[in-house]
Image: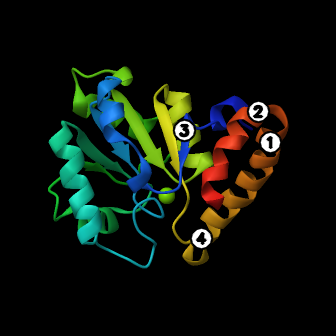
């Protein structure tokens, strides 16, 4: 079904607020492909609040472009992104490569090395990013309670994958420890 290696996040954080964006910039990253649902807000929220808006502002001031990339439909993504005026890709079909290819085209002449993705799901965000060849950062999902059936199915696969990661990549599994802090 998938190579376990492709499910390994480069780093694991509790929230998007815990990521050191200055360090990412110093490492040569310029583009952030940002998931929305359960990475930034729960399914129940349609717009970013003040705290997120401040974070986006800070990230942009460092020198990044944030491109929102979501498997959700256009109306959901457009509504969320409106206040920022950022570019976005809806119906991205992660983990397939199509959405990532679109993103790469948008950010030319930047290449894959300059792109980092942030998301909450191993089998969409992390798998898709790794298959495409960009660094993938995982955050803890905000609220799994309101997830739809297909995401809940993904979570089941994810739990299975996590047990495999624990067994075969204990050093990566250890990074998930921040979720319990
Ligand atoms: Mg998500």
Residue 3 in view of the camera: no
Residue 11 x %, y %: 54, 38
Determine the CA span between mark 3 and mark 4: 21 Å
Q: Which residue is mark 3?
A: 11
What is the CA distance from the residue labelled 1 to the residue labelled 2?
A: 6 Å
* Apparent side of residue 136 relative to residue 69 in the rendered image (left or right): right
CA separation in Å, label 4 and label 2:
25 Å
Q: Is residue 125 left or right of residue 91?
A: right
Proximity of marks 1 and 2: CB atoms separated by less than 8 Å: yes
Mark 1 or mark 3, earlier in chain: 3
Q: Earlier in the sequence, mark 4 or mark 2?
A: 4
Q: Are marks 4 and 2 in contact (CB under 8 Å)?
A: no
Task: Measuring from the top left, give residue 30's x and y in whole percent.
Answer: 27, 31
Question: 10 Å neighbourhood of mark 4: few (<14), some, or many (≥20)?
Answer: some
Q: Secondary structure at mark 2?
A: loop
Front residue of this view, candidates 173 and 35: 173
Q: Which residue is mark 4?
A: 144
Of 178 and 39, the residue lying toward us: 178
Residue, disc 1: 166
Figure coloring: rainbow
- Label 2: which residue? 169
Q: Is residue 167 visible?
A: yes
């Amino acid at each position: 079904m998938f190579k376990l290696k492709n499910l390994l996040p480069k780093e694991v954080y509790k929230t998007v607020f815990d990521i050191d964006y200055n360090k990412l910039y110093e490492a040569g990253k310029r583009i952030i492909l940002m998931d929305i649902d359960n990475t930034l807000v729960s399914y129940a929220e349609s717009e970013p609040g003040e705290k997120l808006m401040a974070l986006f502002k800070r990230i942009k001031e460092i020198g990044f472009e944030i491109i929102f990339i979501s498997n959700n439909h256009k109306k959901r993504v457009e509504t969320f992104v409106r206040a920022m005026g950022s570019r976005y890709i809806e119906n991205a079909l992660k983990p397939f490569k199509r959405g990532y290819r679109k993103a790469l085209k948008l950010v030319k002449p930047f290449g894959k090395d300059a792109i980092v993705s942030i998301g909450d799901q191993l089998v969409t965000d992390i798998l898709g990013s790794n298959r495409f060849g960009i660094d993938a950062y995982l955050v803890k999902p905000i609220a799994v309670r309101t997830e739809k059936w297909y995401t809940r199915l993904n979570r089941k696969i994810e739990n299975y994958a996590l047990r495999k990661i624990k067994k075969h990549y204990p050093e990566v599994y250890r990074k998930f420890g921040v979720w319990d802090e």
